[in-house]
């Protein structure tokens, strides 16, 4: 198993009602598979996940990115700093 | 605040802070004896915006994914140096928390020997890139309610 830490920010954090969530995943999943698994458990997040950006260990990921063991995974909307 | 003195001796300062942005202190840190020019961009909260109809803003609430945001600010500074080799010092600072109209929220400053070195373009690039890749968000709070502002840029993997 691969225990990962999800971190939510901005509108996704408010919608989830939490900043962090520990999740046990099978080893060797891609970001696309993680998204599907997450949406199975939290279908109410589907609207927020449409434009989501995902960072794996603080680096932007694509759907094909493999999730390393014990990864820190940030989920957030397109950024709006400045 | 991180103060990164590169082997070249060129200072880079980047920070996510809840404190007031102190322009003079930042400028002092990125001014070398060879520096003759600084291009400074700062953005502030507007109390009125016209997006279709006129809107009033009570305040903006900023949050950041701080460790990643610091890494991405460092990346923006590295990208500036790769394109404008004449740039001497770089400061990139984002203030977070509740910020009211007329308050500076962000500052990008680049220094160089003189103004004809690309230093204006370098600062412009810095604020544009910050708005694309640095994980910071703002929520607009008005008398009518709250609205998270979403950017439009989708960074590529590893960008």
Image: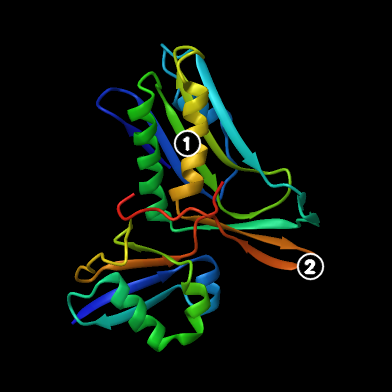
- A3 to B144, vertically: above or below: below
Give how far across and how far down residue B102 sits, in percent: 73, 43
What residue appears at the point 35 percent right and 41 percent down from the top-left corner? B75
- B100 to A1, vertically: above or below: above
Q: Are marks 1 and 2 on the same chain?
A: yes
- B142 to B110, vertically: above or below: below
Q: Which mark is residue B144?
A: 2
The residue tagged 1 is B126
Count of all numbered marks drawn on residues in the image? 2
For the residue carrying disc 2, how many other residues have a C-alpha within 10 Å: few (<14), some (14-19), or many (20+)? few
Mark 1 or 2 closer to N-term?
1
Quadrant of the rendering where the N terminus of chain A is positioned: bottom left
Dot 2: chain letter = B
For the residue carrying disc 1, how many other residues have a C-alpha within 10 Å: few (<14), some (14-19), or many (20+)? many
Between the residue at mark 1 and the residue at mark 2, the CA separation in whole angstroms equals 33 Å
What residue appears at the point 66 percent right and 65 percent down from the top-left corner? B147
- A43 to A35, vertically: above or below: below
Comparing B6 with B158, the one in front is B158
Comparing A5 with A77, the one in front is A77
Q: Secondary structure at mark 2?
A: loop
Q: Are marks 1 and 2 in contact (CB under 8 Å)?
A: no
Looking at the image, residue A62 sits to the left or right of residue B144; the answer is left
What residue appears at the point 22 percent right and 75 percent down from the top-left corner? A29
Looking at the image, residue B57 sits to the left or right of residue B128; the answer is right
Give how far across and how far down residue B51 sits, in percent: 74, 53
Dot 1: chain letter = B
Give how far across and how far down residue B13 sits, in percent: 42, 35
Rendering quarter of residue B117: top left
Looking at the image, residue A79 sits to the left or right of residue A7; the answer is right
């Amino acid at each position: 198993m691969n225990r990962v830490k999800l971190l939510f920010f901005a509108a996704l954090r408010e919608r989830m009602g939490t900043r962090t969530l520990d999740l046990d995943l099978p080893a060797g999943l891609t970001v696309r598979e993680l998204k599907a698994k997450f949406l199975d458990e939290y279908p109410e997040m589907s609207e927020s996940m449409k434009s989501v950006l995902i960072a794996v260990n603080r680096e932007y990921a694509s759907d094909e990115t493999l999730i390393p063991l014990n990864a820190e995974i940030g989920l957030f909307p397109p950024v709006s700093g400045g | 605040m991180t103060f990164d003195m590169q082997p070249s001796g060129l200072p880079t300062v980047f920070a996510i802070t809840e404190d007031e942005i102190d322009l003079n202190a930042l400028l002092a840190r990125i001014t070398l004896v060879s520096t003759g020019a600084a291009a400074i961009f700062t953005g502030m909260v507007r109390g009125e915006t016209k997006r279709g109809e006129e809107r009033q803003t009570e305040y903006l609430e900023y949050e950041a994914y701080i460790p990643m945001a610091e890494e991405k600010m460092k990346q923006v500074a590295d990208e500036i140096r790769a394109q404008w080799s004449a740039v001497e010092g770089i400061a990139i600072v984002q203030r977070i928390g509740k910020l009211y109209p007329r308050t500076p929220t962000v500052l990008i400053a680049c220094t160089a020997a003189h103004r004809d070195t690309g230093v204006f373009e370098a600062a412009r690039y810095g604020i544009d890139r910050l708005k694309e890749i640095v994980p910071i968000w703002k929520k607009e709070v008005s008398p009518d309610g709250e609205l998270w502002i979403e950017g439009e840029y989708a960074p590529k993997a590893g960008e």
